[in-house]
Each structure stands twice: as structure tokens, then as C-alpha cells.
């Protein structure tokens, strides 16, 4: 055979020497001709010629050539959600097609007895999609493709229960098509949040209404393309709807509130903010129809008048929480009629903010008409004075918490009038940013001590001084939480008597920005309440020095949070704090302490064994190298530097 077949030139043949110039494309065979060419195998051969696919190869059968109708029939016959999820990963085309399949359109194939158990498991997986999963998309991540993927992917993994979409200026790829995919693939959806989405219209909301009939909560904010039509569809098709929040939707008005009151028997919570088309007609229709169910309502920046408050006062029989904010067209009569309506017998929490119609007369009527009121907050109401808060304190016998902020007509006489008439249930009193407060030397008649008061906050009231604190020391013997931040007029002469009078043991004390306090006040707190105190804030107290830290380390064994930012402490004080063996400090702030240096770093490392948070910002004495070492050693601790 070797004589017949001569292989002497095989090497030359394999090296490609039969072509003068292998790179000359004109020497290749025409791709139109089908030529079978046999070459001996060559290890790791490199193909230098371009790969050309023949027309016959191009015509090989592919599933991609099937029309969407055929693919739809194939996909809906897949045995389970996991298989559909796998197919959705092939291409966007398949993903969008799979997202258009509803649960009712899925067909389980007929199988023999040997596979019946597998089919039962598939059915069980499909039936367990009760909405356990939550998904949140923000900014440019909010697209139709992502929503389609969520709809397909969550169907077999517990079902989608909560969906939050928060758009911004970079949100471009989200349209009604994305919500349609959710409506088809996630019938278990119970909570939907749409914020800052100008591309979503009534069509998308209607798809949600038709496909997600188990919806219980919807929150819409700054969606200008939505109108009453979309929310009416939600109200008519979602009987389980319990909570509705609408903010800054300029095309949603009274018709939406009318539909909610008429078609939503389980509606409990309603929040409407900055919707110019909402007026008295909508509020009246909502409360006359659903007032027997509504428990929480917030109305903010609306064009409503006294009529709406009168309706609420008469029909809000189940109302427990009511918030009224920036209602500029509501006058004194509205609050008075609301209190006299006798419909708010179950009201437990009331907040009134920036309502110019809120006055002493209306406040007294509200106190009388809400016998079960436990928490009352009034903010930025410039017409309320001492007479109003005192009459309210007398009438509201069940009051447990009172918050007053930026009401500048209230003086120190009104403040102590509240304590003298609040009854035996008041547990928390907060006074903040009231510029009308001034220390007054007067003898206020107190029939008894305020034994129920546990929490006292007097924040950023620059006129409140030592005289007021000494009077508080005589009538508030059981304080556990004390916040006197921003009282620049108080000194040790006011703080020490108040601290000494507390018999229950202080737990949390905030004295930040009390610039005239010294080590004497801190030492009194440490010695008298060291066993109970857990939080101590001395931020901005420049006269607090190492002496205070020594007393804290010696006495405050329960302390978990300490803030001595912008104080007069040095490295010696930090060393004393680190030497306390039984202290279990978790949060420490020494920000802005210019007297501590790199010498404190070893002591901060020792404290870091228990710390979970540390603030060393604006400490010029601590070098960059020492800070880096601290970060390396205390990698478990969250350090601000």
C-alpha cells in the first residue's frame, strides 16, 4: 500500500505550502459550491480563513422562528414556575412573553399515574404564591423589563406581596407595560407604592386593579398622569383595600374619595396631601360613607374648610388617629364644631400643625369632645396661648402625652398651668422652640405633685432658666427621661436640684448645648443615678472636663451611650473611661474634642471591645495614621472619622 500511496509530501501539504499566499482570498473556493475537503488532523491548528456559513446551514430549524402565538402555547404548558423562570432568562422577548401569561392561562399537562405526585407538587407550588416577597426598584433600575422579571421570578417563590417603585429624573424605561406584567404575574400583590413616576397613567393602575384584586394598601406620590379614573378602578375591584395614601397628585380629586367611601368596606387609613382638586365634597362623601370604618386619617395642604372638620367631628365614630396639617382655609369655627360634634369619642391621637384657625376656643372644645384622647401634638399654631393649653389640660382627663412646638404665645405660666391641671395620667410633656418662654419669679399654686410624669422635654427654649428648673424639682419627683437640650440659660444651680429631686432614677439625660453646665452637674447625675442611667448626652458642654469622665467611669456601670463631643476632655479622661472594668459602653462620641490626641488611641481601642459605634470627627489631635490603625483594629465598630 505504501507504494501505491506516496505520503512523502504530507508535511508540505499540512503546512499549507500548496497555496502561494494563504491570505489571498481570491484563491479560496467559492462559498456557493459545496466541496468536501479532507485534511489530516493537526493538533491545535489555527484557522486563519474567515468562517463562512452556507445558506443550507442558515435554514436549520429554530424555535425563534415560531410566532408569538405558538410560543405562548408552549410556555403556558410548562409544568411549573421554575421552568418558566428558566425560559425567561433566554431573552427579553421570551421574558416579556412569559410575563403576559396569567395564572388562569397556565395549563398543567395530562400525565399518567406514575407522575401524579410530581404534578401535585407543581400545583402546590403554584397555590402557595400567597405574597410573601417584597421588591423595591429605585431610579434607573425601575424598568418594564425588571418588573416583568419580578412577575415571572416571584410566581413560584412565594408570590409577590409588596412592590415599591420610586422613580427620579433618571427613570426612563418604566411604562404601563411594566405594571401590566405585574398585574398578570402577581395576583397576590397586597401593597403597591408608586413615587415620582410621570410615565404611569390610569391604564397601568387599571391593569393592577383588574389583576391584583387582593390589594390592601396603595401609596401614590407625585404621579401627575394619574387621575380619578385609575383610583376609581382600584376602589371598585379591590374590596380588601385598607390603606390609601395620595400625595402631590394634581389630577386626583373628590371623585376618588367618593369611590373609596362607596366601594371599600374595609378601608381603615386615608392620607391625602397636597391634592388641589380635593375639597369639602370629597371629604364629606368619604366620611359619610366610610366614617364607621376609618380609624386613621391625615389631611395636609388641602383646600378644605370648616365643613370638612364638622363632618369629621360628627361621622368619625371609629377614628383613633387624626392629623391636620397646613389647612389654611379652616377657621376657629371648624375646630370648635369638630369638638362639639361628639363623634370623636374614640380618638386617641390628635396632631394639629400650622393651622392658623386653631385657637384657644377650638382647643378647649376639642379637649371636651375627645374624652379618650391620650396624645396631643400642636405645632406652629400662633394663636394658641396659655389660656388655650390650660383649658385643654383641664378638659382632656385621659391625656398621657402633650407636645407643644413653635407656639410662641405660650409662656412659662401656661407651661406650669398644664402641670397643675393635667390630671393624674400625664406621662410625657414636651416643649420645643417656644420663644415666648421666660423665667418668671412667681409662686404657682400646686395642689399636688405630678407623680405620673416620667418624661420631660424642654428643648431650644432660650428663656427657660434656673428658676423654672427649681420649680420643676418641687413638683416632678419621678422623672426618668430628661431632655433639656439647647437651654443656654441654665446652670448647675438649676440642674442639680432637679436631678436630686428625681426619686425614680434617671435613665436618659440629654443636656446637649447647655453651655453653662460644669462638672458639678455631671458629678451629681453620676453619683445619684449611676445605677440606672443608660444614655448621657453632653455635646457642646465646654465646661465639662476629665473630672466628669472620672465620675462617669466610677459610677455609671449601666451606661451604654455617651456623647461628650465639643467638650473640654483630654487624653487623661479617655484613659479613665477605658479603665472602668465593669462598664459596657456601646456608643461613644468625642467629636470636636480638640484636646485629645494620638495618646487616646490605645484607650479608644480598649473601649472598642464593647463599642458598636464611635465618632472621632473633627479631632485635630488624632493623626491620620492613628485613625487608620484604629480602623484596622476595630473593624467591627462603626467609626465616623
Image (cartoon, rainbow, N blue to C red):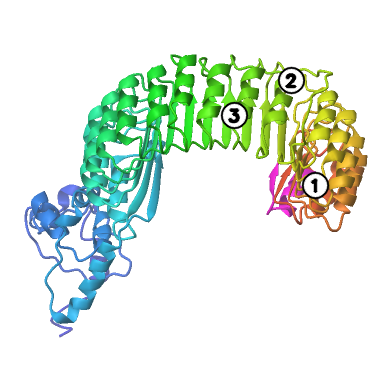
Which contiguous range is marked in magenta?
Answer: 626-641
Horizontally, residue 508 falls left or right of residue 579, namely left
Quarter in which the C terminus is drawn: top right
- The total number of labels drawn is 3
Asked whether 470 or 557 is in front, the reply is: 470
Which quadrant of the figure has residue 215? top left
Q: Which residue is mark 1?
A: 505
Q: Which residue is mark 3?
A: 395
> Residue 323 at what x, y percent from top left?
48, 29
Q: Is residue 87 magenta?
A: no
Q: Which tag, 1 or 2, sits closer to the chain's start?
A: 2
Q: CA distance from mark 1 to mark 2?
A: 28 Å
Q: Tell me the number on the disc at residue 300.
A: none
Q: Residues within 10 Å of mark 1 (few under 14, many from 20)?
A: many
Asked whether 609 or 549 is in front, the reply is: 549
Horizontally, residue 72 falls left or right of residue 408, namely left
Q: Is residue 441 above or below residue 54?
A: above
> Residue 350 at what x, y percent from top left?
52, 31
Q: Which tag, 1 or 3, sits closer to the chain's start?
A: 3
Q: CA distance from mark 3 to mark 2?
A: 18 Å
Residue depicted at 13% across the width and 59% down the height: 74
Q: Is residue 637 magenta?
A: yes
> Residue 569 at what x, y percent from top left?
88, 37
Q: CA distance from mark 1 to mark 3?
A: 31 Å
Which quadrant of the figure has residue 509? top right
Q: Tell me the number on the disc at residue 413.
A: 2
Quarter in which the N terminus is drawn: bottom left
Q: Which tag, 3 or 2, sits closer to the chain's start?
A: 3
Amino acid at each position: 500500500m505504501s507504494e501505491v500511496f506516496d505520503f512523502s509530501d504530507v508535511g508540505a501539504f499540512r503546512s499549507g505550502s500548496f497555496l502561494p499566499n494563504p491570505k489571498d482570498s481570491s484563491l479560496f473556493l467559492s462559498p456557493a459550491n459545496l466541496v468536501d475537503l479532507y485534511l489530516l488532523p493537526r493538533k491545535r491548528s489555527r484557522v486563519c480563513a474567515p468562517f463562512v456559513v452556507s445558506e443550507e446551514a442558515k435554514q436549520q430549524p429554530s424555535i425563534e422562528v415560531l410566532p408569538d402565538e405558538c410560543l405562548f402555547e408552549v410556555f403556558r404548558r410548562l409544568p411549573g414556575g421554575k421552568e418558566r423562570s428558566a425560559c425567561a432568562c433566554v431573552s427579553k422577548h421570551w421574558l416579556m412573553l412569559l410575563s403576559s401569561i396569567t395564572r388562569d392561562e397556565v395549563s398543567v399537562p395530562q400525565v399518567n399515574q406514575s407522575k401524579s405526585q410530581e404534578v401535585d407538587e407543581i400545583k402546590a407550588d403554584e397555590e402557595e404564591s400567597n405574597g410573601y416577597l417584597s421588591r423595591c426598584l429605585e431610579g434607573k433600575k425601575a424598568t418594564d423589563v425588571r418588573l416583568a422579571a419580578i412577575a415571572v421570578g416571584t410566581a413560584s417563590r412565594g408570590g409577590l406581596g409588596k412592590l415599591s417603585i420610586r422613580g427620579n429624573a433618571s427613570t426612563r424605561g418604566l411604562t404601563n407595560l411594566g405594571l401590566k406584567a405585574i398585574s398578570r404575574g402577581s395576583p397576590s400583590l397586597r401593597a403597591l407604592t408608586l413615587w415620582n413616576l410621570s410615565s404611569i397613567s390610569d391604564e397601568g393602575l387599571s391593569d393592577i386593579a383588574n389583576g391584583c384584586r387582593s390589594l390592601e394598601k396603595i401609596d401614590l406620590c407625585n404621579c401627575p398622569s394619574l387621575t380619578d379614573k385609575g383610583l376609581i378602578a382600584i376602589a371598585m375591584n379591590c374590596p380588601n383595600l385598607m390603606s390609601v395614601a395620595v400625595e402631590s397628585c394634581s389630577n386626583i380629586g373628590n371623585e376618588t374619595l367618593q369611590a373609596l367611601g362607596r366601594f371599600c368596606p374595609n378601608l381603615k387609613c386615608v392620607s391625602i396631601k397636597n391634592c388641589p382638586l380635593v375639597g369639602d365634597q370629597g371629604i364629606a362623601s368619604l366620611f359619610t360613607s366610610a366614617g364607621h370604618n376609618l380609624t386613621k386619617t391625615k389631611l395636609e395642604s388641602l383646600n378644605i374648610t370648616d365643613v370638612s372638620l364638622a363632618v369629621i367631628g360628627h361621622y368619625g365614630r371609629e377614628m383613633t388617629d387624626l392629623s391636620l396639617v397646613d389647612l389654611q382655609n379652616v377657621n376657629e369655627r371648624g375646630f370648635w364644631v369638630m369638638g362639639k360634634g361628639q363623634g370623636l369619642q374614640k380618638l386617641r391621637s390628635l396632631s394639629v400643625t400650622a393651622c392658623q384657625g386653631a385657637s384657644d376656643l377650638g382647643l378647649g372644645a376639642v379637649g371636651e369632645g375627645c374624652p379618650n384622647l391620650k396624645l396631643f401634638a400642636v405645632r406652629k399654631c400662633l394663636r394658641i396661648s396659655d389660656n388655650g393649653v390650660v383649658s385643654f389640660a383641664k378638659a382632656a382627663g385621659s391625656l398621657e402625652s402633650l407636645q407643644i412646638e413653635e407656639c410662641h404665645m405660650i409662656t412659662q405660666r401656661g407651661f406650669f398651668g398644664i402641670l397643675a391641671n393635667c390630671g393624674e395620667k400625664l406621662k410625657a410633656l414636651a416643649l420645643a422652640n417656644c420663644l415666648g418662654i421666660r423665667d418668671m419669679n412667681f409662686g404657682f399654686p400646686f395642689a399636688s405633685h405630678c407623680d405620673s410624669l416620667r418624661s420631660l422635654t424642654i428643648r431650644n427654649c432660650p428663656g427657660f432658666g434656673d428658676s423654672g428648673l427649681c420649680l420643676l424639682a418641687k413638683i416632678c419627683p419621678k422623672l426618668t427621661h430628661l431632655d433639656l437640650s439647647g437651654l443656654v440659660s441654665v446652670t448647675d444651680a438649676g440642674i442639680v436640684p432637679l436631678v436630686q429631686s428625681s426619686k425614680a432614677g434617671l435613665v436618659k439625660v440629654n443636656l446637649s448645648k447647655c453651655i453653662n453646665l460644669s462638672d458639678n452637674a455631671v458629678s451629681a447625675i453620676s453619683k445619684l443615678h449611676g445605677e440606672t442611667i443608660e444614655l448621657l448626652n453632653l455635646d457642646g458642654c465646654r465646661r465639662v472636663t476629665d473630672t466628669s469622665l472620672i465620675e462617669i467611669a466610677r459610677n455609671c456601670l449601666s451606661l451604654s451611650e455617651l456623647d461628650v463631643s465639643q467638650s473640654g476632655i483630654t487624653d487623661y479622661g479617655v484613659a479613665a473611661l477605658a479603665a472602668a472594668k465593669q462598664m459596657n459602653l456601646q456608643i461613644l462620641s468625642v467629636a470636636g474634642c480638640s484636646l485629645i490626641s494620638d495618646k487616646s488611641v490605645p484607650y479608644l481601642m480598649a473601649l472598642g471591645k464593647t463599642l458598636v459605634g464611635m465618632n472621632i470627627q473633627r479631632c485635630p489631635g488624632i493623626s491620620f495614621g492613628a485613625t487608620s490603625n484604629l480602623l484596622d483594629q476595630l473593624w467591627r465598630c462603626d467609626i465616623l472619622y
